[in-house]
Amino acid sequence: MKIIGVIPARYQSSRFPGKPLADICGKPMIWWVYNQCKKVDDFDKVLVATDDYKIFNTCKEFGIEVVMSSDKHKTGTDRIGEIADKITADLIINIQGDEPLLEPDTIKAAIKPFYNDSNLQVSNLMTKIDNPIDIISPTVPKVITNSEGVGIFLSRLAIPFPKGCNDYSFYKQVCVYGFKPEALKFFCEYGKKYGKSKIERIEDIEILRFIENGYKVKYVEVDSKTIAVDTPIDLERVRKVFLDKISRGEISVD
C-alpha cells in the first residue's frame, strides 16, 4: 500500500495569519511538523501543500518537499483532494500544519485501521481531555463515538452533557486524518456541488461532511499531549513545551 503524508498549510488564517511560519525555537512551525512526519516509516513520501509563496519559499529554504495548490479552497481537505488528483497513492494521511507536538506514533495510529479493514474510507484520532480549559474552548472539537469507535458527532460545545452519568471523560479531536482517494473525491465533488454540508457549516468541522453523508469514520484513541496552534496564546503554550524538551535534551533544533 502506497501511503503519502500531506501537510496542508495556508497563510491566511482568520485567528492567526501566517501561523505555519511562526517561530518555535528558531525554526518555523511547519518545519517541526514536517520532521515529525518524516519519522513515520509507513510513508512513501511526505509533502507540504500550500497556496502561499511565503510558505512555499520557506519550505524550499529548509529542504521541505512542497507543492503549490489553489488559493480557492474552502477547507484543508479540499486542498488535500487537489494534491491527491496529482499523485498515485492508496492512502493519503492529512497531518495538520499547526500541531508541531504530534508524535510519529500518533500519526501512525491513523494509518493502522486501514491495514485491518480494506473497506475503511476515513480515519481520525481522538485523545482524552485532561485540561478543563479544552472542554469549554470553542477551538477544540469534542468527539463522540459509538461502542465500536465509529464517529457519531463532533462539536465545539462540551458534549455529551453528563446528565445521567458522572463517570465520563471528554475526548478531543487530534487533527490527523486518513483518506482513501475515493473518499477525498466524494468530499471535493460534494463541496463543488453543494458547498459545506449542513452541520459541517454550523460547527465548522470538516469531518462532519463524511459523517452527515453516511461514511464510517473510524476513531482511534491515542495518548497525545498535542496542542493545536489556533491562536497566539496557543503558540506560547507550545513554545514553553519545546523549551522544556530542549532543556531536558529530548529534542534538538539541528
Image: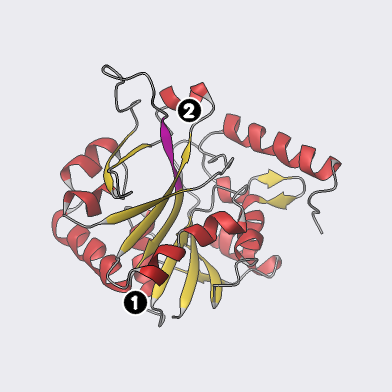
Q: Position of residue 20 (x, y in %)?
A: 57, 50
For the point 49% across and 53% down, which residue is it?
Answer: 96
Residue at 59 percent across and 57 percent down: it is 105
Q: Is residue 119 magenta?
A: no
Q: Which residue is mark 2?
A: 134
Name the dominant secondary structure of the magenta segment: strand
Q: Is residue 132 above or below residue 128?
A: above
In the image, farthest residue toward the bottom:
88
Residue that carries the numbered disc 1 in the rendered image: 85
Where, by quadrant of the figure, is residue 179 drawn? bottom left
Q: How packed is label 2: few (under 14 Cα within 10 Å), some, or many (20 or more)?
A: some
Rendered location of residue 131, percent (x, y)? 54, 26
Q: Amino acid at mark 1?
A: Asp
Q: CA distance from mark 2 to mark 1?
A: 36 Å
**Residue 40: numbered disc:** none
Q: Secondary structure at mark 1?
A: loop
Q: Which residues are magenta?
A: 170-174
Q: Amino acid at mark 2?
A: Asp
- Does dot 2 land on a helix, a strand or a loop? helix
Image point (54%, 73%), residue name:
43
Q: Earlier in the sequence, mark 2 or mark 1?
A: 1
- Which quadrant, please, contains the C terminus? bottom right
